Amino acid sequence: MGDLLNYRDAAPQEQPAVTLEAFLDQPDAGAVRLEAGDDARALLPHLAHLTLVEIAFPSFRDGRGYSAARILREAGYAGELRAQGDVLVDQVAFMRRCGFDSFAPEAPIDQTVLAAALARYDAVYQRAADERVPVWQHRHG
């Protein structure tokens, strides 16, 4: 797939993401998978040695993954943050704003449709993890 989405499939050499419960029992893993009901704040003391946090989206209607991403990015997590599951093309721009930098959607996303969706809005109205400058800040210096 193309560069716009940064698709990721679990490569054989990639360390598998362990569940949050398994990680907390033995916090030596570099990759963790958060399910929709998991509390991302449990990872805060361990962010420095994590290289991947995969956040599950069991349904496109479930927005808890957005909150988990923001919590991690605002706490300083700089590793890969992957949205996995029921990820729709219309959500990718918002997921990027929350800090996701890679995606593993269940269904393929057409790159032409994605490019149009990402180009749809050239202004943002609030600060987010992606550090785009809000339109009000442009207006008021």
Image (tube, rainbow, N blue to C red):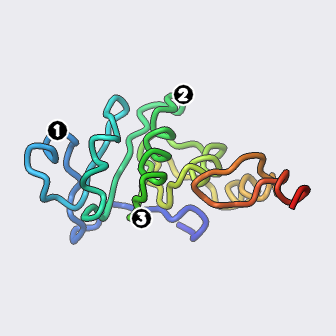
Q: Which residue was labeled with disc 3? A: 78
The answer to whether marks 3 and 1 mark residues whose Cβ atoms lie closer than 8 Å is no
Amino acid type for the residue under numbered disc 1: Glu
Question: For this view, does 131 lie left or right of residue 16?
Answer: right
- Residue shown at the point (19%, 49%) measured from the top left: 18
Amino acid type for the residue under numbered disc 3: Ala
Residue closest to the far left: 26
The answer to whether marks 1 and 2 mark residues whose Cβ atoms lie closer than 8 Å is no
What is the C-alpha distance between the residues marked 1 and 2? 24 Å
Please name which of the two marks, 3 or 1, marks the residue nearer to the observer.
Answer: 3
- Residue shown at the point (72%, 56%) measured from the top left: 118
In-front residue for pair 129/65: 129
Q: Secondary structure at mark 3?
A: loop
Q: Which residue was labeled with disc 2? A: 61
Q: Residues within 10 Å of mark 1 (few under 14, many from 20)?
A: some
Q: Is residue 110 above or below residue 86?
A: below
Amino acid type for the residue under numbered disc 2: Arg
Task: In the rendered structure, find residue 40 and report the number of the disc placed on it.
Answer: none
Percent from the top left, x then y, of residue 88?
A: 58, 42
- Residue shown at the point (16%, 38%) measured from the top left: 21
Percent from the top left, x then y, of residue 9?
A: 36, 61
Identify the mark nearer the N-term, 1 or 2.
Answer: 1
In-front residue for pair 100/140: 140
In-front residue for pair 63/77: 77
Question: For this view, does 40 lie left or right of residue 14?
Answer: right
Q: Residues within 10 Å of mark 2 (few under 14, many from 20)?
A: few
Considering the image in quadrants, where does the C terminus appear? bottom right
Q: Secondary structure at mark 2?
A: loop
Percent from the top left, x then y, of residue 134?
A: 77, 54
Identify the mark nearer the N-term, 3 or 2.
Answer: 2
Percent from the top left, x then y, of residue 44?
A: 31, 49
Q: Which residue was labeled with disc 1? A: 21
